[in-house]
Image (tube, rainbow, N blue to C red):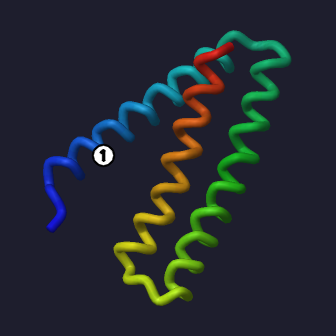
Amino acid sequence: MTNIWSNWLEAMRFGAEVQQVMGLRMLRIAAGGPRAATEMQHMVAEKLAAAAMIQNAAIHAVIQGQDPQKATDVAFAAVKRRVRANRRRLSRS
């Protein structure tokens, strides 16, 4: 049985990380210059790659016979890894 509180806390943690990434990106873009242009290009390219990655992870899970919840978990895990990597990258510089 899944603990509803752990799911809720994980969703809140993920939401906070997403907001951090958005804020850090907005700061970088607002600063202007070549880093802003690079970040905007990176952001758009990343969205396209993330959509393909999520779709691929979900399809692969379904093909392996996993239930829809497992397929969703696999796809969501891929998104969380990307958000966490972006937060670390944007926080360093």
Residue 72 location in percent, x, y?
Answer: 42, 69
The residue at the point 71 percent across, 56 percent down is 49
Q: In which quadrant will I find the C terminus?
A: top right
Q: Residues within 10 Å of mark 1 (few under 14, many from 20)?
A: few
Residue sticking out furthest to the right? 34
Residue 42 location in percent, x, y?
Answer: 75, 37
Which residue in the structure is indicated by mark 1? 11
Q: Nearer the viewer, residue 49 or 74?
A: 74
Instruction: Please determine whether, in this image, residue 12 is positioned above or below residue 73.
Output: above
* Residue 13 lies in quadrant: top left
Instruction: Please determine whether, in this image, residue 51 is positioned above or below residue 29.
Output: below
The residue at the point 62 percent across, 60 percent down is 51
Q: In which quadrant will I find the N terminus?
A: bottom left
Is 7 placed left or right of 55 in the picture? left
Is 19 placed left or right of 28 in the picture? left
Is 70 placed left or right of 60 in the picture? left
Q: How many marks?
A: 1
* Residue 91 lies in quadrant: top right
The residue at the point 47 percent across, 89 percent down is 65
The residue at the point 53 percent across, 52 percent down is 79
* Residue 26 lies in quadrant: top right
